[in-house]
Image (cartoon, rainbow, N blue to C red):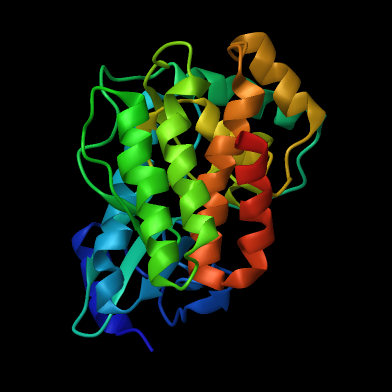
Amino acid sequence: MPDWSSIYQQLDNEGVHVAPDSDPTPVRGGDISAAWRLSCQSGDLFIKTGPLVAADMFTAEEEGLSEIARAGAIRVPQVITSGQTKAAAFLVLEWLDFERADTAVERRLGEQLAELHHSGMERYGWHRDNSIGLTPQHNSWRDDWVEFFREQRLGVQLRLAAENGFGGEFQMRGARLMKRLPVYFDDSPQSSLLHGDLWGGNWECSNGKPVIFDPAVYYGDRETDLAMTRLFGGFGAAFYEAYESSWPLQHGHKERQHLYQLYHVLNHLNLFGSSYLARADELIDKLL
């Protein structure tokens, strides 16, 4: 159980005063951390708590949300504070009530994601590493996108897969794919600010507007975000039509979609086991 008195003290230091006799209520969160709703005098809060080893992950999430917020393109939950007690780490965000998204909201999400992607850098990566699920995600700056994706995305996941017992022919085919990466690119893609983990569970509608959260931020090829949206569902036709109208995708994006989805499928293979092996094999087959 978190040390709530220490968390309340830090909130008080930030000028956020917990309502008298208010107790945190458990709410549905993720698999990684516990989630709570807490009533404060200025409004309810959403709090994530986890073991001390999660402190760096929460800090990266805080910085990622702030990076997206600075772009001014799409709403993210406001960060209140983060920190740690003697036994736990925590992240405090504003509480948002969610409602069912209609077609207009999905269209707005597509438009605003395209706007977010127009925020870019001259290089690929980010100023710090973060995580994709529980897996460390490396973001050292690179000038070349193919090099970045080979070294810090596919290469990392394939090495983890070998350590987890997925070797032999699977690794041989992965190595062939790594050598072929330049084939899938006519030129270097624009470096865009990415959510990084944009599946259907990481966006909602609040007060008639789309909200994205739980990012794994870095600067890279915008097609990686779009590929992730198609991996597990949760995005309607209006979203894709609006994105394409705002910023059409480049030639070859359908093939690169398999490439970018493979990164996430390999991550699921490494996190959750062999139930994702057939999907990884399928994507490698399509690419080779």
Q: Nearer the viewer, residue 22 or 173?
A: 173
* Residue at 42% from the left image edge and 17% from the top image edge: 189
- Residue 104 is left or right of residue 172, and the answer is right
Viewport quadrant of the C terminus: top right
- Residue 186 is left or right of residue 252, and the answer is left
Residue 170 point in image, percent of width and height: 53, 57
Q: Is residue 86 above or below residue 226?
A: below
Q: Nearer the viewer, residue 168 or 42?
A: 168
- Residue 18 is left or right of residue 94, and the answer is left
* Residue at 29% from the left image edge and 23% from the top image edge: 144
Q: Is residue 145 above or below residue 130?
A: above
- Residue 246 visible in the snapshot: yes
Instruction: Give the farthest residue toward the bottom.
Output: 1
Q: Quadrant of residue 248?
A: top right
Residue 221 point in image, percent of width and height: 44, 26
Residue 108 point in image, percent of width and height: 66, 24
Q: Quadrant of residue 63?
A: top left
Q: Nearer the viewer, residue 262 or 245?
A: 262
- Residue 27 is left or right of residue 168, and the answer is right
Q: Is residue 40 above or below residue 93?
A: below
* Residue at 57% from the left image edge and 53% from the top image edge: 265
Viewport quadrant of the N terminus: bottom left
Residue 169 point in image, percent of width and height: 53, 58
Q: Nearer the viewer, residue 275 or 130?
A: 275
